[in-house]
């Protein structure tokens, strides 16, 4: 496993975890048809936490974080995001989606819009912001992810790492309180992983609440305050990174770690 | 790695100039070899095609251009102005039993009167004929005579041109359709040209206020323009009206049907599926008849409902059903990540569709939609069945006119040519777009 994050210095001083609960999931189950993907998930995430979710393929990691912004619907249990419950109520879903940004494995940029337009679209149409203000914010976050000079290009003209950084900037423009990352670096060539991780670390330093599905264990060690291990739809183990890596309790975690770290 | 001694030349590398490409791959010969004769099968096809073209092109060009009559205002202008003298000649005829006998028969000879420039070409040909011999048998005879080479009489098309274009629209008012269609065409060209400013605004103007303006221009009754009943609209203008109304109406309606077909709400979904499948499984002629006969049944009794309007509604829904299927394909071709990203940003369904999904889907679909529209443009000729006078109908009326009898070739040739111009330009445009989609983004 590549460890691009280990070379990056992390300033932990501003990563303050507050007492305020950002996400609360209780007794949550989800089925795809008759297939039980998520089983009795209980998870509380406080404002400012950085959580890394890992686990074997098909264990339900993506499904879990997609339930948090209702890209997937759960059938049982409760999900509260900033004290708003996710139900079929569209207004609640809208509220939650404004607060939660998401970054995908395959970037999912809008190919027919320029980089800057990708960033300003949601502020203009969802937050009803004037175009000039949205562009100002868009440029600010493109600077945060260090590609302001690409603003007028189309996504297809950028490298994978650049595209993923645009995707992060696009989410940030909505000024979210929580960011979800679903394997943001696993579609990237090794040399581009670092540039994306740097941006994510920067976000963590700014105090962003983050849930990140990733197998970048270096990132997990340095940035996460909690690592969650999932297998077959269950949260098997969660712990601080040091404890998690050095002293895994369950057999399944040990097996998983031995496989992933021996690469 | 083992060491190898390359001697003193090792470090010296003098690149030779590039060899020119083999002569065979360049120039005309290269092109012919590469494109026309790459192997024996394609070679044979090329030869067959050339033979085919040889038999088709020269006669058509001769008839339509070289031997054709262009100027004049009556049928007379197409009549040969040379004198045909019928000579009596004595020649040998062959009887059915093989015996020969001497017969007298006539042979044409063309004489150019003094001071006349002949308006036709003629040829001296051996012409086979039959003469009645003694008794009741027929004898075969071959005589040499002058034959006038037939050419197209475009005078006919010229004289009838205005009717082909405008139908029975009153002469004094024909500037109205001319202005509307001219401006419309210019705006379409503007809208489709890359890199011009405000193309979106032009498109919006074409889509919303322009049809209204066009309607009042055609129909009149306002601003001092006399009213022209739409039963008088006809010719190419009517063909253009029907196809452009149907096309502009069918696009939004087709998108709506396609979206409805994917709706979560069962009633909407079923309604859309029924409309789409019904209209797709019925021929256009049936739709036209139904527009005439069935549509009035749904209306309160006593309302009279314009014939042209009924046809327009029928044709529009018909095309919309096909458009919906094309749109459905375009929507299915988009990766689900686009929907997810839009959702995750908090865009609602309509904003997601309008800003993210449809712009991309429509872009993918343009070539398919254009070829659909080409088909529709041609299918408008079917409206003559319900009594509308489109271009083809006007041509048919003209060729049955006693004054111009026998000139149907010219009429249909013209009609085909007009359709070809329209359809071919649409087809070229869609090819251009397809290339652009391949290379661009
Ligand atoms: N739309 C769906 N319909 C049915 N089954 C699904 C669907 N999406 C995912 N699954 C199944 O649910 C399980 C969990 O999927 P999920 O994508 O959450 O796994 P993951 O932990 O993210 O795996 P990976 O590391 O491969 O991304 C898998 O077995 C998958 O096949
Ligand atoms: Mg996944």
Image (spheres, helix red, strand yellow):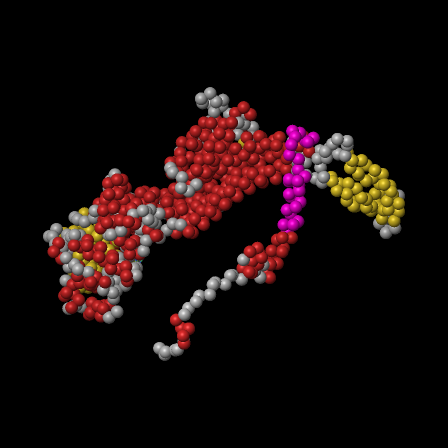
Rendered image quadrant of residue A8:
bottom left
> Relative to B397, does residue B336 appear above or below in the rendering?
below
Q: Residue at x 24, y 55 (%)?
A: A181
The secondary structure that dominates the magenta segment is helix
Is residue A159 found left or right of B93 in the rendered image? left
**Is residue B56 a member of the stretch shown in magenta?**
yes
Rendered image quadrant of residue A160:
bottom left
Farthest bottom residue in view: B2
Q: Which residue is drawn at 19% across and 54% down?
A: A202
Q: In the rendered image, is residue A101 in sight?
A: no
Q: Where is residue A79? Give x, y as percent.
A: 20, 52
Q: Where is residue A148? Give x, y as percent.
A: 26, 49
Q: Quadrant of the N terminus of chain A?
A: bottom left
Q: In the rendered image, is residue B1 in sight?
A: yes
Q: Where is residue B6? Give x, y as percent.
A: 41, 76
Is residue B316 found left or right of A9 in the rendered image? right
**Is residue B145 a member of the stretch shown in magenta?**
no
Is residue A23 found left or right of B354 in the rendered image? left
Ligand 1: give its quadrant. bottom left
Q: Which residue is drawn at 65% across and 43% down?
A: B60
Q: What stretch is highlighted in magenta?
A: B52-77
Q: Quadrant of the C terminus of chain A?
A: bottom left
Q: Where is residue B249? Give x, y as percent.
A: 43, 37
């Amino acid at each position: 496993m590549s460890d691009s994050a280990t070379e990056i210095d992390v300033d932990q001083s501003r990563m303050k975890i507050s007492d305020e609960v950002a996400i609360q999931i209780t007794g949550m189950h989800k089925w795809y048809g008759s297939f039980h993907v998520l089983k009795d998930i209980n998870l509380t995430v406080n404002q400012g936490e950085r959580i890394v979710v890992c686990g074997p393929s098909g264990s339900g990691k993506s499904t879990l974080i997609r339930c948090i912004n209702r890209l997937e619907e759960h059938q049982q249990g409760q999900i509260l995001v900033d004290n708003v419950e996710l139900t079929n109520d569209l207004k609640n879903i809208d509220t939650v989606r404004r607060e939660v940004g998401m970054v995908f494995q395959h970037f999912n940029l809008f190919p027919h819009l320029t980089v800057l337009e990708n960033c300003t679209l949601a502020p203009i149409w969802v937050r009803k912001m004037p175009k000039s203000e949205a562009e100002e914010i868009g440029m600010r976050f493109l600077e945060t992810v260090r590609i302001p000079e690409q603003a007028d290009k189309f996504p297809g003209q950028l490298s994978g790492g650049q595209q993923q950084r645009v995707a992060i900037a696009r989410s940030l423009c909505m000024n979210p309180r929580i960011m979800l990352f679903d394997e943001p670096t696993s579609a990237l060539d090794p040399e581009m992983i670092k540039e994306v991780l740097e941006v994510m670390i920067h976000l963590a330093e700014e105090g962003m609440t983050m849930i990140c599905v990733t197998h970048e264990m270096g990132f997990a060690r340095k940035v996460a305050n909690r690592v969650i291990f999932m297998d077959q739809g269950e949260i098997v183990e969660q712990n601080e990174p040091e404890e998690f890596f050095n002293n895994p309790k369950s057999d399944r975690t040990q097996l998983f770690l031995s496989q992933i770290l021996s690469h | 790695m083992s060491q190898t001694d390359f001697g003193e030349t090792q470090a010296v590398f003098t690149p030779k100039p590039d060899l020119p490409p083999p002569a065979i791959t360049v120039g005309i010969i290269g092109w012919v070899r590469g494109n026309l004769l790459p192997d024996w099968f394609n070679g044979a096809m090329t030869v067959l095609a050339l033979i085919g073209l040889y038999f088709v092109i020269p006669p058509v060009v001769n008839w339509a251009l070289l031997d054709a009559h262009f100027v004049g205002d009556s049928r007379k202008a197409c009549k040969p102005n040379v004198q045909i003298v019928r000579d009596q000649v004595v020649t040998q005829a062959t009887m059915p039993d093989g015996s020969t006998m001497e017969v007298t028969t006539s042979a044409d000879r063309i004489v150019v009167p003094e001071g006349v420039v002949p308006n036709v070409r003629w040829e001296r040909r051996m012409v086979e004929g039959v003469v009645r011999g003694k008794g009741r048998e027929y004898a075969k005879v071959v005589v040499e005579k002058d034959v006038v080479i037939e050419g197209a009489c475009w005078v006919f098309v010229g004289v009838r041109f205005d009717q082909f274009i405008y139908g029975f629209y009153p002469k004094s008012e024909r500037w109205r359709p001319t202005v509307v269609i001219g401006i419309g065409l210019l705006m379409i060209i503007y809208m489709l040209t890359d890199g011009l400013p405000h193309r979106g605004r032009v498109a919006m103007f074409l889509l919303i206020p322009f049809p209204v303006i066009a309607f009042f221009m055609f129909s009149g009754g306002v601003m001092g323009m006399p009213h022209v009943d739409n039963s008088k609209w006809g010719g190419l203008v009517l063909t253009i009206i029907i196809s452009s109304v149907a096309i502009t109406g069918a696009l939004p309606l087709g998108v709506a049907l396609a979206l409805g077909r994917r709706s979560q709400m069962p009633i909407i979904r079923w309604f859309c599926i029924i409309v789409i499948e019904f209209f797709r499984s019925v021929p256009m002629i049936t739709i036209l008849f139904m527009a005439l006969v069935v549509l009035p049944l749904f209306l309160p009794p006593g309302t009279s409902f314009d014939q042209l309007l009924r046809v327009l509604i029928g044709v529009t829904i018909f095309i919309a059903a096909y458009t919906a299927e094309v749109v459905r394909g375009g929507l299915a071709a988009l990766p689900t990540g686009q929907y997810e990203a839009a959702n995750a940003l908090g865009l609602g369904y309509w904003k997601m569709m309008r800003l993210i999904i449809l712009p991309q889907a429509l872009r993918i679909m343009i070539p398919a939609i254009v070829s659909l529209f080409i088909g529709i443009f041609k299918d408008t000729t079917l409206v003559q069945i319900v009594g509308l006078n489109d271009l083809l109908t006007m041509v048919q009326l003209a060729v049955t006119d006693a004054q111009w009898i026998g000139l149907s070739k010219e009429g249909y040739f013209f009609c085909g040519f007009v359709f070809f111009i329209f359809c071919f330009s649409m087809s070229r445009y869609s090819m251009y777009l397809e290339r652009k989609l391949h290379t661009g983004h």
